[in-house]
Amino acid sequence: MLLFPWWLKGMLQTKMALPSAVLRPYVWAYGMTVGRLSSEPLRIPLPARPKQLLTFSFADSYRLLCPGSHETHPTPRVTVVGPQTHAQAGLSAFGIIDNFTIHFQPAGFHLLFGIPMTELTDAAYDAYAVIGARLSRMEHELACAPSFEERVRVVERCLIGMTDSQASFDPIAFVANRLFRRHGLQGVSAMAADLDLSPRQFERRFLAQVGIPPKLYARIIRFNAALDNKLRLPNTPWSRVANEHDYYDQMHLVRDCREFTGESPDRFLARLAPLPAFHTFYATKPVRTD
């Protein structure tokens, strides 16, 4: 069942919704992108980014761009994407798009599915190979759901059932979620001290649940927060964006941008600006568009 009118051509629309209170420690947001692209494929650049995603494709799947060539490979019908520490070649979108995505909190995927996140860092896999057959019912019910709101209800029922079998919420996850909310602006020593752990103990446990060492993860969050700020308020000077996100100066932000995207801020932003339906990939502030 395709969730957009037949006349919606040449454009994509994205809706977002926040999770219920019980799932907020595990899920950052839900998103759905639908529409029809009848001209050239859209090329979606992918910088380093902190979020873990679970994406269901119910029409044409995104295609993965191959580095250094124009070749592409289809992505799985249901894809799990781990946190990324560097820029990837990107995605190509074409045809009929009907995707539903769960954006997880920093340790949310690990807590719900028990997967060591280091196995997913800088990677994307067929979700059935990672999670297993329990995805089947969720995928089927999502495919049959008649609206975005019903899809959210389907996913919430499934995920809440998984939380029932979990032990107490891990304090490492609490600190990681707080780091994300604060846009990466907290030191590793302070976070370790909050949990009465040595920095080495904290880093080891953080890495297992989040997939990236905490210092690097904080830098990636901060960069994505700065990028999100610029996308939402494009007339804001880069110097002000840098200052608001606690960079030493604008050149500090430029260096992080080159490390995490391979390009200068203005050049990378120019590639993102025509793709508003995909800005949620980089968003770090809660949104609600449903």
Image: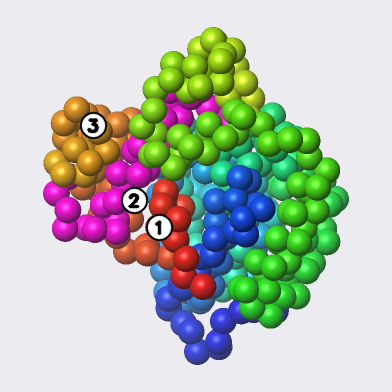
Instruction: Name the foreground residue: 219 vs 5.
Output: 219
Give, as a three-letter code, the residue at label 1: His
Give, as a three-letter code, the residue at label 3: Tyr
* Secondary structure category for the residue under label 2: helix
Q: Which residues are magenta?
A: 210-238
Q: Position of residue 177 (x, y in %)?
A: 52, 38
Kindly report the distance in space between the C-alpha atoms of the residues bearing marks 2 and 3: 15 Å
Can you identify the residue that label 1 sits on?
A: 279
Between disc 2 and disc 1, the foreground one is: 2
Tags 2 and 3 in contact by the CB under 8 Å rule? no
> Against 66, is 196 above or below?
above
Kindly report the distance in space between the C-alpha atoms of the residues bearing marks 2 and 1: 8 Å
In the image: residue 162, left or right of residue 281 = right
Can you identify the residue that label 3 sits on?
A: 247
> Against 6, is 254 above or below?
above
Q: Residue at the spot x=60%, y=17% of the render? A: 204
Please tell me which of labels 1 and 3 falls first in the chain. 3
Quadrant of residue 171 within the rendered picture: top right
Give, as a three-letter code, the residue at label 2: Asp
Please tell me which of labels 2 and 3 falls first in the chain. 2
Q: Position of residue 234 (x, y in %)?
A: 22, 58
44 part of magenta stretch: no
Tags 2 and 1 in contact by the CB under 8 Å rule? yes
218 part of magenta stretch: yes
Q: Position of residue 11 (x, y in %)?
A: 43, 76
Can you identify the residue that label 2 sits on?
A: 228
Q: Residue at the spot x=84%, y=52% of the render? A: 134
